[in-house]
Image (cartoon, rainbow, N blue to C red):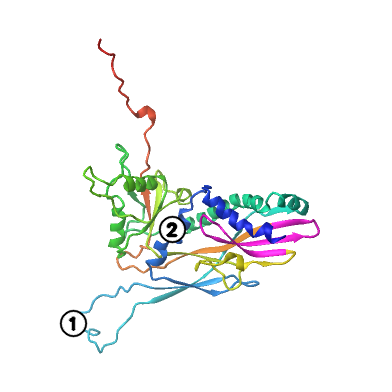
């Protein structure tokens, strides 16, 4: 398969993205791979075991745990500078990547390919990939949301049930000022001073929109709430349901980490670092092409393999990925059940219908 028929696929994907092609949301994936989750936490993630025959890739994840020892009265044992001290515990987890998914193969015969090359096979193959990439990213996102939900803890000792939060006033359909500050207060009571990352559905999205565009007084003063890292996810309430409510997950930056592995790229086994020259990673001869393909919407890298089946005279294109989600075993001094991931029940936003809006018609004119 000649270069002119394979390599331009990546550029075509970029072109489609730039021209405004739409995709379904992947909020949980966006939250864990966001700068808010990467840059404001003391978690170190490093690949320590490459995948090989019979063995899966492994990551080492290191973080400093909280120290909950009580204070010491002056004069008591351990209070002097010469007495023996303690230090905060450094925790190290090893995460073995367990999830592997592949997209449905693209298949085309040599005769079909020869005819298509006259019209641009890169465009044809790219069209086949667009839907597959969307489906693949939704599967990854669902796995992330499921893991985060399963590791959600309490917001206060003895308060295991999800806490209800009203974000939208049902009478005026406007955001309730200070609503998300309730979440911040729960995290601050638990010893997390920074703003948590929020993942939610339609009501949270409407709340965020209203705060962004309706936050000024008539005099022009800004009364908007500080901008939280908010990620829209319409899969969350399905995989993490709360009866009669939309689900909202709040997580402290760093308590959840997304890890993945690439087989086809030699020393560049993961996309955590970014800034990789994709075209330089292709290995190619007359019978196969191996490399990676970047999803232009999410930036996610997929292992891409193209092989020629000589027996059936057909080309096959396959995309595959290996990934997993890690959550921190968080020691917390205020509430032992606080994991840094908290589940909230959001009172559903119900937009008014046309029939519910009273319309006053003018009376007959007076002649």
- Residue drawn 31% across and 20% down? 361
- Residue drawn 52% across and 63% down? 324
What span is colored magenta in the figure? 288-316
Residue, disc 1:
74
How packed is label 2: few (under 14 Cα within 10 Å), some, or many (20 or more)?
many
Whether residues under marks 2 and 1 lie with C-beta atoms below 8 angstroms apart, the answer is no
Q: Say which of 260 and 15 sits in front.
A: 15
Secondary structure beneath label 1: loop
Q: Is residue 82 left or right of residue 314?
A: left
Task: Report whether residue 361 is seen.
Answer: yes
Q: Is residue 319 left or right of residue 285?
A: left
- Residue drawn 72% across and 50% down? 118
Q: Say which of 10 and 354 sits in front.
A: 10
Task: Report whether residue 165 is seen.
Answer: no
125 versus 264 height, above or below: above
116 versus 306 height, above or below: above
Residue, disc 2:
31
**Quadrant location of residue 168?**
top left
Quarter occupied by the C terminus: top left
332 versus 360 height, above or below: below
């Amino acid at each position: 398969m000649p270069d002119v028929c394979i390599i331009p696929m990546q550029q075509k994907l970029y072109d489609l993205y730039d021209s405004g092609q739409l995709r379904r949301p992947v909020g949980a994936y966006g939250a864990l791979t966001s700068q808010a989750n990467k840059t404001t936490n003391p978690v170190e993630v490093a690949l320590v075991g490459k995948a090989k025959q019979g063995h899966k890739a492994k990551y080492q994840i290191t973080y400093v745990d909280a120290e909950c020892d009580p204070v010491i009265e002056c004069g008591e044992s351990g209070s002097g500078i010469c007495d023996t001290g303690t230090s905060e515990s450094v925790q190290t987890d090893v995460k073995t990547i367990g999830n592997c998914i592949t997209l449905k193969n693209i298949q085309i015969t040599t005769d079909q390919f020869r005819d298509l090359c006259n019209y641009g096979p890169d465009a044809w193959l790219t069209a086949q990939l667009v839907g597959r990439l969307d489906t693949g990213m939704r599967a990854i996102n669902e796995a992330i949301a499921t893991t985060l939900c399963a590791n959600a803890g309490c917001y206060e000792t003895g308060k295991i049930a999800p806490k209800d939060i009203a974000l939208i006033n049902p009478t005026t359909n406007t955001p309730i000022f200070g609503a998300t500050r309730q979440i911040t207060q729960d995290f601050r009571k638990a010893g997390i001073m920074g703003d948590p990352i929020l993942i939610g559905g339609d009501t949270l999205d409407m709340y965020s929109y209203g705060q962004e565009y309706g936050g000024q007084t008539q005099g022009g003063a800004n009364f908007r709430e500080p901008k939280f890292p908010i990620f829209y996810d319409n899969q969350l309430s399905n995989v993490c349901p709360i009866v009669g409510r939309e689900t909202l997950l709040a997580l402290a930056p760093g308590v959840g980490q997304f890890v993945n592995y690439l087989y086809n790229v030699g020393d560049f086994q993961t996309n955590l670092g970014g800034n990789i020259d994709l075209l330089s990673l292709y290995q190619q001869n007359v019978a196969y092409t191996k490399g990676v393909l970047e999803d232009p919407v999410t930036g996610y890298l997929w292992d891409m393999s193209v092989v020629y089946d000589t027996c059936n005279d057909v080309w096959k294109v396959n995309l595959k990925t290996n990934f997993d989600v890690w959550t921190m075993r968080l020691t917390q001094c205020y509430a032992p059940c606080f994991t840094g991931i908290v589940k909230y029940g959001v009172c559903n936003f119900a937009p008014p219908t046309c029939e519910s809006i009273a319309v006053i018609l003018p009376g007959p004119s007076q002649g």
